[in-house]
Image (cartoon, grey):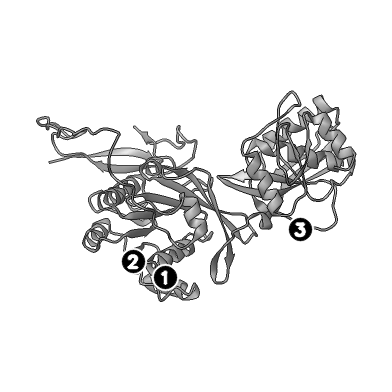
């Protein structure tokens, strides 16, 4: 008989400990280590309790030059979701979707399920958090009650697997993986052992049957998907459904994707009738103010493969504090400190006696270095109280030497600016576009002179 071995597992990161401690040494979280009983494997298996060694089955190798044709993607009818997935859902793929409570994960997946069912795909929607009556109410609000979606409310993995193997659906939606439990394990539902085992069985079913698997995952207080990191390694794509508090827009960001580009985004707007696709996200992140104001610059950025224009706002004011304040929203605070130091050392601009506040309008968070030049332009504009001329965009990476370095996909950024009616751009040296009046900034000194002259 196999024996049960007890281990201490961190419920935040999945690290295994030999004994209980108040703080996990792997992730640093407090009071997350719990005792779990893991069933040992059968005799002869890897990790099993003794017995003769079982002989493994010999593998048959094949060459890279396979003749199998690539199956077409499954389109959901939602262009933004398909974009984030890399052009649709790949057969046999597993996707993990995480997000804060109340952000709209269940709403998004119910709309996707309805779109797939109306397109001819058989869809099984299994919820472990809500009763079927509650899901029907949401479907009525979303005007999706007529979609032929197979709906069930269950948490037992054995029953779910038996049902899926008999029904053989094209798409399976599990909401959520943390509510699933297997009676073969003595651990409680939601623990690391249960989440890992249930995810493994569901993903294996998707690979063997060719069905598409969509898993909903809870997130921790740090915004990371709860449970062991091995779950993220099991699936083909990991997506975060993001929102800014007080904003109606939602961003679906692919942080891992084996079938498409990472960091691709889909943008939605939350309405009373559900999530609405936003085909042009730049409209959300531009203020649209007619009168130019000092401290504002438009950054031409890239999110995944999509160009997005967003306004960067800066406020520089004299400070009476010994250590002036530095506050930033939507950008990296360490990069702001570096940029201020370079402006001081290379361009001779004194920010040391000023409070500096930087904000990315619309609630979007940007992380690419190409935003350096636009942020520097906004800071200089506020310091000089000199509004930039309207109809200008800016992008470029600032080096510690004060030089402005070129960035990738310059042509796509400039094309987006032309499409939205902009007439000029502040760029690094070498950028070219026939439809815009380009101003090249080789150094931050060139930028400061350009801003003093009115942009």
- The N terminus appears in which quarter of the rendering? top left
Q: Position of residue 64 (x, y in %)?
A: 30, 33
Circle nearer the N terminus (1, 2): 1
| Residue that appears at 21% across and 39% down | 40
What residue do we see at 71% from left, 45% from top?
Answer: 299
Residue closer to the observer: 112 or 420: 420
Which residue is labeled 2 in the image?
A: 153
Count of all numbered marks drawn on residues in the image: 3
Q: Quadrant of residue 160?
A: bottom left
Q: Earlier in the sequence, mark 2 or mark 3?
A: 2
Cβ atoms at labels 1 and 3 below 8 Å apart: no
The Cα–Cα distance between marks 1 and 3, rounded to whole angstroms, is 39 Å
Where does the image place residue 165, in percent across and percent down from the top left?
22, 58
Residue found at x 42% / y 70%: 135
Residue identified by numbered label 1: 135
Q: Is there a contact, CB below 8 Å, between mark 2 and mark 3?
A: no
On residue 288, which mark appears?
A: 3
Return the residue found at the far front.
434
**Which residue is rendered at x = 66% and y = 52% of the image?**
363
Asked if residue 8 lies left or right of residue 382, the reply is left
Q: Are marks 1 and 2 in contact (CB under 8 Å)?
A: yes
Q: For mark 2, give the secondary structure.
A: strand
State the residue in front, 450 or 372.
450
Per the model, the C-alpha gap separating discs 1 and 2 is 9 Å
Residue 325 position, x and y percent, is 78, 39
Tell me the quadrant of the picture where the C terminus can be found: top right
Query: Residue 5: which quarter of the image?
Result: top left
Residue placed most toward the observer, 120 or 242:
120
């Amino acid at each position: 008989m196999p024996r049960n071995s007890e281990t201490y597992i961190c419920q935040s990161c999945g690290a295994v400990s030999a004994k209980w401690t108040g703080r996990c040494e792997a992730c640093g979280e407090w009071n997350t280590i719990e005792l779990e009983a893991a069933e040992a494997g059968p005799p002869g298996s890897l990790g099993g309790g003794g017995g003769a060694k079982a002989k493994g089955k010999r593998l048959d190798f094949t060459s890279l030059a396979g003749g199998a044709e690539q199956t077409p993607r499954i389109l959901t009818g939602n262009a933004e979701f398909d974009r984030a997935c890399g052009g649709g859902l790949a057969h046999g793929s597993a996707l993990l979707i995480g997000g804060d409570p109340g952000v709209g994960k269940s709403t998004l997946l119910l709309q996707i399920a309805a779109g797939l069912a109306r397109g001819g795909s058989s869809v099984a929607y299994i919820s472990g958090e809500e009763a079927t009556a509650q899901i029907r109410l949401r479907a009525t609000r979303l005007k999706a009650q007529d979609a032929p979606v197979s709906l069930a409310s269950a948490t037992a993995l054995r029953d779910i697997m038996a049902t899926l193997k008999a029904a053989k659906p094209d798409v399976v939606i599990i909401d959520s993986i943390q509510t699933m439990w297997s009676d073969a394990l003595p651990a409680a539902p939601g623990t690391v052992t249960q989440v890992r085992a249930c995810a493994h069985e569901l993903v294996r079913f998707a690979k063997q049957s060719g069905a598409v698997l969509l898993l909903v995952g809870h997130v921790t207080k740090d915004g990371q998907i709860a449970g062991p990191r091995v779950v993220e390694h099991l699936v083909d794509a990991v997506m975060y459904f993001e929102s800014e508090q007080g904003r109606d827009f939602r961003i679906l960001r692919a942080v891992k994707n084996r079938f498409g580009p990472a960091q691709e985004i889909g943008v939605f707007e939350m309405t009373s009738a559900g999530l609405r696709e936003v085909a042009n996200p730049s409209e959300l992140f531009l203020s649209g103010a007619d009168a130019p104001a000092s401290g504002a610059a438009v950054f031409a950025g890239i999110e995944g493969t999509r160009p997005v224009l967003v306004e960067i706002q800066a406020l520089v004011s004299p400070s009476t504090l010994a250590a002036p304040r530095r506050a930033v929203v939507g950008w990296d605070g360490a990069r702001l400190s570096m940029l201020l130091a370079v402006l001081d050392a290379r361009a001779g601009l004194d920010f040391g006696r000023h409070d500096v506040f930087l904000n990315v309008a619309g609630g979007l968070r940007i992380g690419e270095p190409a935003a350096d030049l636009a942020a520097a332009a906004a800071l200089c504009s506020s310091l000089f109280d000199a509004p930039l001329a309207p109809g200008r965009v800016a992008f470029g990476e600032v080096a510690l030497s004060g030089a402005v370095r070129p960035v990738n996909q310059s042509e796509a950024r400039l094309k987006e600016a032309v499409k939205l009616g902009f007439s000029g751009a502040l760029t690094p040296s070498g950028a070219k576009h026939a439809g815009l009046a380009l101003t090249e900034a080789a150094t931050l000194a060139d930028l400061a002179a350009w801003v003093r002259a009115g942009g």
